Amino acid sequence: MTRATADETPATAPRARRGPYRRLPVEQRREQLIAVALELFSRHAPEEVSLDEVAAAAGASRPLVYRYFPGGKQQLYEAALRTAASELTRRFVEPSEGTPTERLAHALDRYLSFVREHAAGYGALLRGGSAVETQRTTAMVDEVRRAAFTNIVEHLGVEDPGPRLGLLIRSWVAVVEATALTWLDEGDVGSVESLRDWLVDEFVAMFAVTALHDAQSARVLRRLLTHYDGAGPGAKLIEGLGGLLLPEE
Amino acid sequence: MTRATADETPATAPRARRGPYRRLPVEQRREQLIAVALELFSRHAPEEVSLDEVAAAAGASRPLVYRYFPGGKQQLYEAALRTAASELTRRFVEPSEGTPTERLAHALDRYLSFVREHAAGYGALLRGGSAVETQRTTAMVDEVRRAAFTNIVEHLGVEDPGPRLGLLIRSWVAVVEATALTWLDEGDVGSVESLRDWLVDEFVAMFAVTALHDAQSARVLRRLLTHYDGAGPGAKLIEGLGGLLLPEE
């Protein structure tokens, strides 16, 4: 990448015609262009990335990029987004080992490092209002949300989540996104580990409150607690809250 | 409105030129066009509303609409959105009377009826990806979120919310939006009252969990509890959670 860009620094028209660019097999070139675009779109808002920059960073010419992506920057953005969405979706997959809160913590660790790796682009995408945003791009974001939803449902061991359990999961996914955005915007909300632990605790608390309002959620919660030896996160939560909320004797 | 539309049904060019439209003073006409647009944009996704429909529903001609809104549908959409945003922001204002959870419940009642009144448009706006969405429209949505944030901070009696307290409030606002969207999408999540009560309980629980992680939040929470005679929502929460989460003796 750096080498090719250096080659082109004193680029002149004749030189370009002679073809200073590295030749790559079709599929490999396509993947390389997407990888380069993803890297640029991760570090900058979509408005700040030009097709020329992608071409330069890939050691390719502008016409070559158009040959692979006739729709130009928009098509390249969507291809990069699709790759990122697949990658993020893969990170949600967690084996059914350990306690449910341990599994949630592992998936959150992987999610938060994804957010860090794709900071500017992920922030711009979630905030919306960008010119590259279309019904296709929001559909991809929704797909990722649905993948998160489906994974959580699976780990809860639920066949058919009712409306309240569904609402809880969607709401907590929204909390995770709001946390990611706050972290990107303000930076000083704490370490990744402390954010992860807070998010896990919030999940337990939000779930427990939902269980007070909904019979299915209560059944699922009770079954989940059998994964823990002794106290479990619910009892720990109550102990903590008791010290905080109950009047001192 | 209906009358004017009926007048235009057999509209012919000469008739239009003679001016079958009701004449209104400038400011009043502008407000009427915005009100009509807001009504249409509330009941339909922005893609489904045309400038001609707005004109017809307002009993006005297409050129007249353009005279007031040279930017056409986009400008009209943004004006309608600005009106809706001001209206929603007004609904957040709640006197400092009653307990904090009562105040939150009142504001939520008003928010949820706003969501119901503007169902299709509000859903499309929050979901994003619409062609009328720009940095200006997302800025307006953010303004509303900030207004919600500021109101909550005021009722908490906090001068300068630290990062964790800020994160909690942003997260809960995200929960409220996710709840509104789920309600609009699926319809069967329960009555407005039960959603409101669930959201209030979630606020208490999320706040309490944050207080376990953050000293400022703990101080603010303890002060809020002095608004309650006797038990308060924290104690009720612990009682409920205890029955649910603690092993039976």
Image (cartoon, coloured by chain):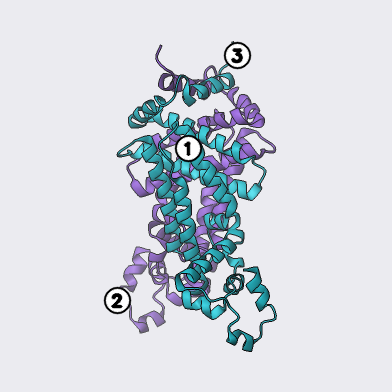
Chain colours: A purple, B cyan
What residue lies at 43% left-to-right and 22% top-to-bottom? A245
Question: Which element carries disc 3, helix, strand or loop?
Answer: loop
Which residue is identified by label 1? B104
3D distance between C-alphas at marks 3 and 2: 77 Å
3D distance between C-alphas at marks 1 and 2: 64 Å
Q: Residue B195, position in %: x, y?
A: 58, 39
Identify residue type, mark 3: Glu
Which one is nearer the viewer's eye here, A218 or B43? Answer: B43
Which residue is identified by label 2? A10
Question: Which element carries disc 1, helix, strand or loop?
Answer: helix
Packing grade of label 2 (10 A; few <14, some 14-19, many >=20) is: few
Q: In which quarter of the image is the C terminus of chain B?
A: top right
Which residue is identified by label 3? B248
Q: Does residue B70 show up? A: no
Identify residue type, mark 2: Pro
Residue A39: quadrant of the picture: bottom left
What residue lies at 51% left-to-right and 37% top-to-bottom? B105
What residue lies at 46% left-to-right and 77% top-to-bottom? A63
Which one is nearer the viewer's eye here, A107 or B159? Answer: B159
Residues at circles 3 and 2 in contact by the CB criterion of under 8 Å = no
Q: Does residue B207 show up? A: yes
Q: Residue A62, position in %: x, y?
A: 43, 75
Which one is nearer the viewer's eye here, A102 or B228? Answer: B228
Identify residue type, mark 1: Leu
3D distance between C-alphas at marks 1 and 3: 34 Å
Residues at circles 1 and 2 in contact by the CB criterion of under 8 Å = no
